[in-house]
Each structure stands twice: as C-alpha cells, then as structure tokens.
Image (cartoon, rainbow, N blue to C red):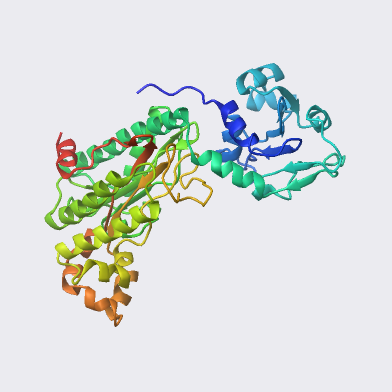
Amino acid sequence: MPKPGPLDHAMHRDAVLSQLPEGKLVYVPAGKAQTRNGVEGNARFRQEPDFLYLTGVEEPGYHALFGTGTDAPFVLIAPRQDPDMDVWCGKQADRDEIRRVTGADIVYYDDEFDKALDAVEAQEQQTIFVPSHEQNALPDDTDGMFCGLRPESTALKKVMAKARALKTSKEIDCLRFANAVSGEAHVAMWRHSAASFRTGQDVHEYELEAVFAGETMRSGCRHLGYPSIVGAGVNAATLHYEQNDKKVKSPDDLVLVDAGAEWRGYTADITRTFPAGGKFEARRKAIYEAVLDVQVRAIAEMKAGANWQMVGARAKMNTVQNLIDLGLVKGNAQDAVMAGVSSLFLPHSLGHLLGLQVHDVGPGGPVPDTLRPGHVVTCEPGIYFVDGLLQPAYEDSYLKDFLVRDEIERFKEVGGVRIEDNIAITEDGAENLTTVAKTVEDIEAIMAA
C-alpha cells in the first residue's frame, strides 16, 4: 500500500476556527522536548495532538497563533536555534522553508512574539482561546506582552474535540495505512513464534515485541501509538500488561498482542490473540471463537445512526450467552448480565474513538453517543480469566449462583482473548480498516506456512 501524502491542515484549521466567535485569538503550543535523565540527549518526541492536527508540525518548541474571522492569519512561531548548535543538531530551516512546508501565512521566531501579536492585531483585554491543559501557560512572557489578554480555556477544548472526532478522507487514509503496516507486523510475530517452537528455540514476550517494532519501522512507521502489550498464557488476563518480559512456556499458550503503529500521528489499535506454536488447543479455540463471534456481530451493527452504548450492551449479552453455551456460566443471559457477570469476564467497554490518540477525543469523551460518518472506533470484545475478579465472585451470595466454578477453573490457563479491529463509519455502512487475518483457520494456515 502506498504511503498517504500530507494532510490538509488548512481544512482542519477551518473546522476549528470557524466554530469560534470572530475577533478573538487562539494560541496553541507544541510540546516541549524532554531530556533523558537530564544530560543524555532528548527522549523520543511525540507532538501534542491538537497542535499536530492544526499545523502538521512534528517538532517540539513551536507555537501557533491565530485570529478568528475572515482572512485572519495563521502565524507560526518557531524556536530559534543557536547557530552553535548547528554542529550538533543540523542547520535549522529558514522562515521561507518553514512557511512553505507548513502553509503558515507568517513565520516568526520565539524571540519575536511582539511581531506575532502585531500580525494578529492583538488588543488589550482581547479573549485568547487556549487548550485546557495549558490554561495558565501562555508563552514565557518576560516583556509582559500577553498580560493584557484574557485566556479562555473551555471553548477551544470542546471545538477541537468535535472537529477531531470526525475524520476526513485523508485522515482515514492515514489510519488505513497504519493498520496495513501494523497487520503485517502482527503476522510477522505469529510466524516468528511458530518457527521458533518448530526449531526448539525459546520465545520471549519482548522478542515478539521487538519483531513488531522492527517490522513497522521497516515500513516507515517510526512511532508506535502506545506501549505494546504482549502477554502470553495467564499474562493475557492482565488488560494493560506491559512488562513483556516472560518466556512463552508452551506452544499451546495463547499470546495476546495489542499493538499499533502510527502514520503522521494517526495510530492503529489492533489486538490479535494467537497460539504460540501455531495450533489452537481445544479450550483456547473455544474461547477464541466465542470472542470472535461477539466481535463479528458487533461490527455488523456499526453504522451511522447506531447507538454506541446499545451496541456495547448487546456485545456483553452475547458474551455471556456464549459463556453459557460453553458451560462456564449458567442461568439466563439477561439475568446474568444484570447481576454483573459480564464484567467478570469482560471488564472493559467494547471500544473507543481512534485517531491522533489511541483513545481519541470526542464531544462526550473517548466514546461516541451515536455513530456518525467520519467516526473511527475500535471494536474489541474479549474474555479474560482474572483471579482478582473471579475469586471474590465465587464467594458473592448473588454472583456465585451464575458461575460454574469447576469449568471456569479448567479454562483459567487460557488467560485471556481479545480481538480488536478499527472501524470507519461511512455514509452507507462501515469499513473495517483492519484486514489482518482473525479466523482460527486463517491464523493456523499463516503460522504453518
């Protein structure tokens, strides 16, 4: 798949600024470089999502200043690099190059804030909208140039969330590419694991993590969207397991991998669970197919106008019914859900918005109320055997009547299964951006090759 080209950040800016009252100012800072242990160089930098959305600038230390209303300029303030640092960091791009690359109307350096304020015609007591997390952090202002402005930190957050929640076609292109690259990296892990067991070599979780990171970087995705989760056996029952430091004990063990690369800041969020040796053992296969059934049915419901909470509620009901069918839960599925049984085995929601953050923003937070064209959401049901949830439930006077303890204990070494795809809602349905294999037959065939 070819790499998607640049995004239309002018369209992004218009989507935000057009929703704010005219005659005001907007200030959005980039993130700041963080040193590693003080003197050992900089840690790998990841741009502030709002700043990246509005400007496309991926480097630290910048500032963006906008006016609202027709013909208001986009002023970009760049960090001025000391010429002595050119030896260590390379020569800084000049104003014309920065303007050409970013589409800024005017570029100043961070010792020229007075000129930047003049360019947007700043006035005493004028409202300046700032991100909520920066409500008390206008630029370092030793000359007091910003003191006469009135920062407002609520409106911009709401407008940014509304705009970012609905992706353009170019944003979805980035997510589709990130999914394609991440999917290939998941498959590379499966093959590495199966080949290692066939040849009698040890396999460690960190080894699989390294395979994923290497494959995505080889394809041009230099950043992961979040720390990879690689949990083998019972470690798969820890939802945000990040230690990734254990040996995979058996070819029968399931390995749950939640990992995604990003492209231009837009991250995939894919989970696949696979048998370490390439063949699903019977109990593990039964749980896997129960989860896959829930996911397939949930994705079929995901279209414009669907109530997201209802889609999630039906997924929990289907999870419990499948556990009843497997003999791990007894009674009526609806009664069991009402009692809280679903949360013992599926203690998280069905999914969340996805974009410049793995849990992306929306008007109501990281989950939508009603699905709309342009939403990209994850669909990630699971079944986990978590001691910390099951042991108290066995003693609970109400919950224990729904649980078949002997069967649950027999399945506990399964650990956990999660299957996660990224779904783009369209005008006439949905597109599953995650194309990597997920049926038992396809996974086994890939790992046998």
Q: Residue at x 73, y 35 (%)?
A: 22
Q: Is residue 394 left or right of residue 47?
A: left
Q: Quadrant of residue 149?
A: top right
Q: Dividing the image into 4 quarters, which one contains the C terminus?
A: top left
Q: Is residue 361 left or right of residue 80?
A: left
> Height in image: 159 above or below 171?
below
State the residue in front, 275 or 441. 441
**Residue 428 percent coordinates (x, y):** 34, 34
Residue 19 appears anywhere in the view? yes
Q: Is residue 42 visible?
A: no
Quadrant of the rendering where the N terminus is positioned: top left
Residue shown at the point (26%, 71%) measured from the top left: 335
Pick the front one: 172 or 37 = 172
- Which residue is more in the foreground, 298 or 110? 298
| Residue situated furthest bottom in the rendering | 397
Q: Is residue 285 above or below residue 47?
A: below
Rendered residue at 57%/28% (across/down): 11
Q: How many marks?
A: 0
Residue 156 image offset from top left, x and y in percent: 65, 44
Decide if residue 262 is on the left or right side of residue 117: left
Instruction: Give 333 or 269, whichever is nearer the viewer.
Output: 333
- The quadrant holding residue 376 is top left
Q: Position of residue 352 (x, y in %)?
A: 42, 49
State which quadrant residue 431 falls in.
top left
**What's the residue at 62%, 46% (across, down)?**
157
Above or below, 363 against 49 in this view is below
| Residue 334 position within the rendered picture, expressed as x and y whole percent measured from the top left | 26, 67
